[in-house]
Amino acid sequence: MLLSEIINNDFTVVTNVDYTDIDVNGAMCTDLLSFAMGKASYGDILITIMNNNNSVAVASLLDLPCIIIPFGLDVPESVISRANEQGVVVLKTLLTNIEVIIYLGKLGVC
Amino acid sequence: MDSFEFIVASGELVEAGVVSSCIKKELMKRNVDRSIVRRVSVASYEAEINIVIHSNGGTVRANFEDDRLEIVFTDIGPGIEDIDMALTRGFSTASEFARINGFGAGMGLLNIREVADEFYISSSDKGTILKVVFILSR
């Protein structure tokens, strides 16, 4: 499924990475970055409250195209800048992590 | 043989991943299979993070020779007190700072051992040496 088909009014895109042709294959929800390193698959969306550069590094190294930061948490400018450099799309949302998973589940993403 | 050496500073979590990113780019330049790139990335990032959060700093040397990649992570202490415990899932001595940044789950070394074709580790109070090897042609 295309990332652009997932993004609705509940999500704010904070990066300027072009996402029109980006495919997503699944999702991984965790705040333990070593867990994500060990278990996330190519094309997964990473849902995490870790709004830091390390999440961007994990996403970039594993070819995870998108990070969703839930609970209305802010994304620091330094993180946005790093994500833009690495080509990782970052979305923020007021939804909880569970609400994001339910939404992605209804879409058939996970 | 092509060799690359990097310095990793202690406590610099913001910059963690730069070394792993360089190694990944080198692999992609060599058209290495994506699944192998992923395994190398997992190992190099976890090991880089370990130097940042557990040691007083160290170096990473990546040696490419034919279809073999050897990466050696060397730090300057304080060392791992009990390597068997460090290789036990869930065991961690990570600081509060590391934990609030998403690390310290007690999975890092295990992740590395799981993805590497060869895995060697030795440690004393002078430091830890971790060597991983990947066969790039599989």
Image (cartoon, rainbow, N blue to C red):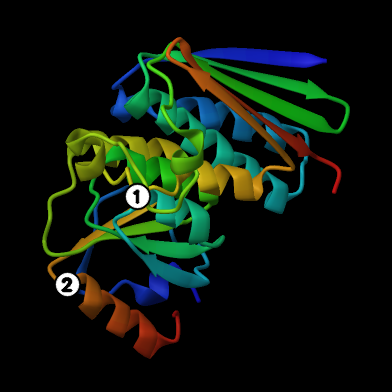
Locate residue A39, reporting x and y percent: 50, 61
Asked if labels 1 and 2 touch by Cβ distance under 8 angstroms, the answer is no
Residue in the image at 48% along x and 65% along y: A44
Residue in the image at 18% along x and 47% along y: A75
Picture quarter containing residue A78?
A: top left
| Mark 2 or 1, closer to the camera | 1
When the figure is inspected, residue B116 is found, relative to residue B21, above or below; the finding is below
Chain where mark 1 sits: B
Label 2 sits on residue: A96
Can residue A17 be seen?
no
Side of B6 where B9 appears, left or right: left
Locate residue A21, reporting x and y percent: 52, 63
Locate residue B110, reporting x and y percent: 53, 47
Locate residue A22, reporting x and y percent: 50, 62
Label 1 sits on residue: B105
Circle 2 SS class = loop
Can residue A101 be seen?
yes
Same subunit under labels 2 and 1?
A: no
Count of marks overlaid on the render: 2
When the figure is inspected, residue B50 is found, relative to residue A66, above or below; the finding is above
Residue in the image at 39% along x and 47% along y: B106
Badge 2, how many Cα within 10 Å: few under 14, some, many 20+? some
Residue in the image at 36% along x and 90% along y: A106
Picture quarter containing residue B68?
A: top right
Q: Please name the amino acid that badge 2 sits on.
A: Thr
Badge 1, how many Cα within 10 Å: few under 14, some, many 20+? some
Q: Please name the amino acid that badge 1 sits on.
A: Ala
| Of B50 and A4, the residue lying toward us | B50
When the figure is inspected, residue A23 is found, relative to residue A100, above or below; the finding is above
Mark 2 and mark 1: Cα distance apart in space: 23 Å
